[in-house]
Image (cartoon, rainbow, N blue to C red):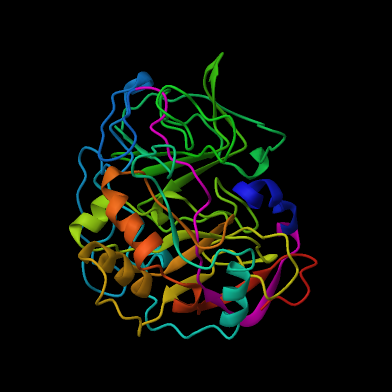
Amino acid sequence: MKQGGLGQLGLGVLALVLGACSDDAGAGGAGGAGAGGSAGSGAAAGAGAAAGSGGGGGVAGVGASAGSGGGQGAAAGAGGGGALPSVGGCSVFTATSPWNEDIGSRPVHRRSADYLASFSSRGATAIHLDLGSEEVEYGIPYSVVPEGQPLVPISYGVDGEDYSDESDPGPFPIPLDAPIEGGRPGADPADGDRHVLVIQQGSCILYELYLAVRTTSPAGYRCAASARWDLKTNSTRPAGWTSADAAGLPIFPGLLRYDEVAAGEIRHAIRVTAPRAQRAYIAPASHFGPNADPTTPPYGLRLRLRASFDESAYSAEARVLLRAFKRYGLIFADQGTGWYVSGTSDPRWAPLIEELHQRRPLRDTDFEAVDTGPITCGAGAGRCD
């Protein structure tokens, strides 16, 4: 949401006038949404598998942690092979979710070249892991809380942005010291996207805030947008609605987490950003971008690393990531710097960051946009295909 994001994309009113385009749309995505994840103020240590015990009931797991009760879901992932992604004892959506779909055999989108050019249109032409190793303020943190976590009130309106009419209302079970994206230990961020992500064990509900600010009277949070996701189902937003992310998508399912790399397999699509978004979307996205130009990517677009890409020179950890890029790909979720891929902060990322940023970068020409279904067009979009 930096450099455009949700602030530019409050176009939910366009949901009242939808046009479904008959041409198939591609899947893709690339790049993350700029600097972010923090250790937050309070108990959490931020990067790594730190566990916190914070106010309002305590954070059960923060950052790259799977949280107490973590473990892999039992169901086989879509496309075969392995368990579903999981956190805190909860599978992250079902085997039929688009997030968990193997897109390796999906056809290349006919506008692939246009979409790739749009991702790279402002000078970023290679994958950038938008997460931190030493700097805890980079990346997007999350918390895992127990089923009995106390509820806190949620109010709306931050920095002139208010999407309460497209939000799930509180109260939410968010600890009062939950980490806020972009913060440092003991200090909350004053700008940026300021996401807060919380997974509640037992209920397996994911709660997400955009532009979160702590409040003291009453003790809780003020934000610009809030969303609630049932991880036991393939829940989506109403047509035309945003979420804590511009595309109307959940954020947590698309994060790179080091524990998945260490386990040897990433089994889900990965969140990415691009400078411009079309006034259209592809499911499971639900929100329009601002641009009528059909050569710009629609939200929900999926990209994948070409099957022919040679992985042999890369480290074992990098190959885990490359295989995920080929099999599950990237999903376009927000406006920001092109090809920025989102994840949590963790000191163990350092070798992989150095490898992909310095020695063996993944270029835009190594990717292709793929066709995963029809595009839904926003009012005034004209032709969007």
Vertical position of residue 183 compared to residue 329: above or below:
above
- Quarter-wise, where is residue 254 in the image? bottom left
Of 155 and 67, the residue lying toward us: 67
* Image position of 355 with respect to 328: above or below: above
Residue 21: in magenta span: yes
Of residue 120 and residue 45, the one placed in the foreground of this image is 120
Q: Residue at x 32, y 24 (%)?
A: 58
Q: Is residue 157 visible?
A: yes
Instruction: In the displayed orientation, state which residue is furthest to the top.
Output: 217
Left or right, 261 with reference to 371: left
Q: Residue at x 36, y 54 (%)?
A: 256
On the image, which quarter does residue 92 sit in?
A: bottom left
In the displayed structure image, the side of residue 334 where residue 138 appears, left or right:
left
Total number of numbered discs in the rendering: 0
Q: Is residue 140 magenta?
A: no
**The C terminus is located in which quarter?**
bottom right
Return the x and y of residue 159 as percentages of the image width and height.
68, 33
Viewer-closest of 121 and 245:
121
Principal SS element in the magenta part?
loop
* Residue 268 percent location from the top left of the image: 35, 63
User: Could you tell me which residue is drawn at 57 percent across and 74 percent down?
Assistant: 116
Q: Horizontally, is 9 left or right of 91 in the view?
A: right
Whole-percent x, y for residue 215 in the image: 55, 20
- x and y percentages locating residue 113 in the rendered image: 58, 81
**Does residue 86 appear in the picture of this structure?**
no
Quarter-of-image position of residue 167: top right
Image: magenta residue range: 15-42
**Compared with residue 195, is residue 41 higher up or lower down, i.e. above or below?**
above
